[in-house]
């Protein structure tokens, strides 16, 4: 299966740590990627190859992988982090891209 | 800087076709693959396919095979997405996005995105 499952929503208070999980059968074999999308804007790549950060992405964003699940962790959440977050990977055959359904992060 | 600039908003009737363009600048066009991704109103991201800069190599998502055509023009560093037999469910913002991996590799994540093109299908 190439499906990726995310929780629809996560809420945290400013300064706390947010964790967004993504699960899928192909994740032990394929890298994961995370995107942030603010309303009315194009997505932005936040994490690639499970845990690497593109230049310009704050250090408070990190990624990890364990078995069939990957996690995006945002430490010291700020109000500006409120957005939708999507995980993405490739099917086990390496033939197509799949996105998770997205998680809305609300900063209380 | 590295940019992908897409064509403007489109309005089409059901059954018609639409062609969206995506012009690259700031990098060597032939060095990277391009993805097409769409997002229906209030919905998540949906991958449509991937192509190399010339359009000579491409893979379409199974859902769109037979209804989508991806082409490229290396002389203008522009790629195109054409969707035919439009229906109301095709109403969405369509994005092009550069694959992060250096060709011939791909599926390395999408590091640069166009601003999106809104396509509305309505009678």
Image (spheres, coloured by chain):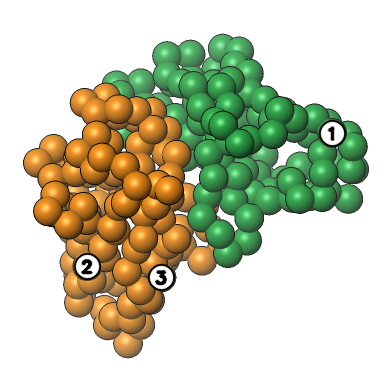
Q: Position of residue A53 (x, y in %)?
A: 58, 27
Q: Position of residue A86 (x, y in %)?
A: 56, 41
Say if residue A3 shows up in the picture. Answer: no
- Marks 1 and 2, how far apart in space? 43 Å
Q: Is residue B77 left or right of residue A71?
A: left
Is disc 2 on the same chain as disc 1? no
Q: Is residue B62 left or right of residue A79?
A: left
Say if residue A94 shows up in the picture. Answer: yes
The disc placed on residue B118 is 3
Residue wearing tag 2: B19
Is disc 2 on the same chain as disc 3? yes
Colour chosen for chain A: green
Task: State the residue lying farthest toward the bottom.
Answer: B123
Q: Position of residue B46 (x, y in %)?
A: 41, 49
Please tell me whether mark 3 sits on a helix, a strand or a loop.
strand
For the point 33% across and 77% down, the residue is B10
For the point 56% across and 32% down, the residue is A55
Colour chosen for chain B: orange
- Tag 1 near tag 2, CB within 8 Å: no
Q: Chain under label 1?
A: A
Q: Is residue B80 left or right of residue A106?
A: left
- Marks 3 and 2, how far apart in space? 12 Å
Residue wearing tag 1: A76
* Mark with earlier residue (3, 2): 2
- Observer-side mark, 1 or 2, equals 1
Viewer-closest of B107 and B13: B107
Query: In this picture, is A26 found above or below B38?
Result: above
Query: In this picture, is B104 found above or below B85?
Result: above
Neighbours of disc 2 within 10 Å: few (<14), some (14-19), many (20+): some
Please tell me whether mark 2 sits on a helix, a strand or a loop.
strand
């Amino acid at each position: 299966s190439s499906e990726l499952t995310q929780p629809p929503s996560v809420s945290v208070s400013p300064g706390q740590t947010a964790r967004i999980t993504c699960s899928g059968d192909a994740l032990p074999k394929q890298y994961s990627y995370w995107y942030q999308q603010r309303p009315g804007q194009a997505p932005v790549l936040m994490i690639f190859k499970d845990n690497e950060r593109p230049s310009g992405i704050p250090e408070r964003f990190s990624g990890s992988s364990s078995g069939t699940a990957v996690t995006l962790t945002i430490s010291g959440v700020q109000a500006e982090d409120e957005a939708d977050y999507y995980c993405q990977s490739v099917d086990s055959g390496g033939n197509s891209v799949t996105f998770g359904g997205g998680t809305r992060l609300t900063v209380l | 800087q590295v940019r992908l600039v897409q064509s403007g908003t489109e309005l089409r009737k059901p059954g018609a076709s639409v062609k969206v363009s995506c012009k690259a600048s700031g990098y060597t066009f032939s060095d990277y693959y391009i993805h097409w991704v769409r997002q229906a109103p209030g919905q998540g991201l949906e991958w449509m396919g991937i192509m190399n800069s010339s359009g000579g190599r491409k893979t379409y998502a199974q859902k769109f095979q037979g209804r989508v055509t991806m082409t490229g023009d290396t002389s203008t560093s522009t790629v195109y997405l054409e969707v035919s037999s439009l229906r109301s469910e095709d109403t969405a913002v369509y994005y092009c996005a550069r694959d992060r991996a250096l060709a011939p590799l791909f599926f390395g994540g999408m590091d640069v995105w166009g601003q999106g093109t809104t396509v509305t299908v309505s009678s």
